[in-house]
Amino acid sequence: MKGLKKQRRVQVIVIGFVALAVSTALIGYALRDGISFFLSPSQIAAETPEETEVFRLGGLVADGSIRPDEGVKFFFEITDGGATVPVHYVGNDVPPDLFEEGQGTVATGRLVDGVFLATEVLAKHDETYMPAEVIDALKEQGVYVEPDPSDGPAVIN
């Protein structure tokens, strides 16, 4: 009798682990398209992602790089001080109101023939905000300066 209870308990535990593994695999499969990695321009220069890979590119909008195109499309460059990536925005919206040169931005899209085709561009939401990923990438390059709260936004050396 005791052996049967122990066997049943082991079976329930094994079935529980199998159910957990299957549910984890199904959740991962369902979320595979919703997960996008963040890369800095220096990371892209070091290792070029595949053309089919959708990811987020973050850094600062390079000075003098914003150029309009037809309709709502436009070109600009994202830099982290170590490398610069040309970006062609191909989305359906106009750029965010706070999108400007020298400010932090994160774009979502894919890299094709050395040009990042962005479908979404995000900009800071006020004059002192910069995305954490962008700050980390700029710190890696040694160009980020902690802002003085009385001075306003962060600056680059």
Image (spheres, rainbow, N blue to C red):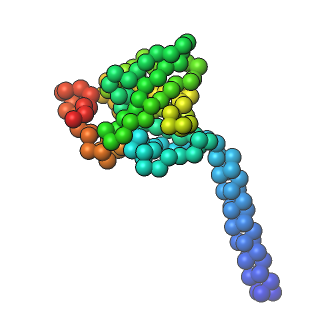
Q: Is residue 36 above or below residue 153?
A: below
The residue shown at (59%, 19%) is 92
Point out residue 132 in the picture as x, y percentages from the top left corner: 38, 40
**On the image, which quarter does residue 35 sit in?**
top right
Residue at the far top in the pictured view: 71
The C terminus - image quarter? top left
Instruction: Classify residue 36 by image quadrant.
Output: top right
Location of residue 23 (image quadrant): bottom right
Q: Is residue 47 left or right of residue 27?
A: left
Q: At which x and y percent is residue 55?
A: 53, 40
Q: Is residue 71 above or below residue 65?
A: above
Q: Judge from the rendering whether residue 148 lies leftward or rightward of residue 137; answer left or right.
A: left
Image location (x, y in percent) of residue 38: 47, 43
Which residue is at 53% across, 46% downward? 49
Q: Residue at x 41, y 29 (%)?
A: 77
Q: Nearer the viewer, residue 87 or 59?
A: 87
Q: At x 50% / y 46%, what residue is drawn?
A: 48
Residue 132 in view (yes/no): no
Q: Which of 47 and 121 lies nearest the eye of the viewer?
A: 47
Check the picture and name the quadrant holding the N terminus. Answer: bottom right
Total labels: the figure holds: 0
Residue 54 visible from this viewpoint: yes
Residue 25: % across, % down? 68, 56
The residue furthest front is 113
